Amino acid sequence: MKTLLKLYNTKTCPLQLKKLHLDWKFNDNGIEKGFQFLNFVKAFEFMTQVAVVAEEQKHHPEWTNVYNKLQVRLTTHDSGGVTDKDFDLALAIEQLLKQ
């Protein structure tokens, strides 16, 4: 049996982002953030670290990478929008940046 997750909307999502001190933006039923690294190798290293965490959480980002730039989008497709799974992964991504 599937657990129903709380869905955040245009009103509640920005409040939760602020509460968690996350500098991400709510857009089209997802949260997004862009990152810039020194070069492609650094960007790819970071993506690899995120991939390991995402696999552990069983929640995977949508992302695009062009050279040293990475755009990350998180949404819970099964629930149709942003849930705590997205905030958890965003927090983990931010922790990786601090390492």
Image (cartoon, rainbow, N blue to C red):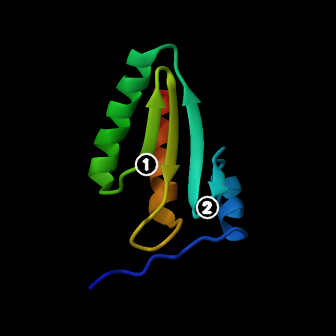
Q: Is residue 94 left or right of residue 21?
A: left
Return the x and y of residue 76 as percentages of the image width and height.
44, 64
Q: Which residue is mark 2?
A: 28
Q: CA distance from mark 1 to mark 2?
A: 13 Å
- Pick the front one: 61 or 16: 61
Identify the element where label 1 is drawn: strand
Q: Residue at x 38, y 16 (%)?
A: 41
- Vertically, is 7 above or below 57? below
State which quarter of the image contains the C terminus: top left
- Vertically, is 56 above or below 96? below
* Picture disc at residue 62: 1
Q: Is residue 20 left or right of residue 83?
A: right
Return the x and y of residue 6 as percentages of the image width and height.
52, 76
Q: Residue at x 26, y 85 (%)?
A: 1
What kind of residue is marked 1?
A: Glu
Return the x and y of residue 88 as percentages of the image width and height.
47, 55
Q: Residue at x 50, y 43 (%)?
A: 72
Q: Residue at x 48, y 60 (%)?
A: 75
Q: Is residue 82 left or right of residue 85?
A: right
Identify the element where label 2 is drawn: loop
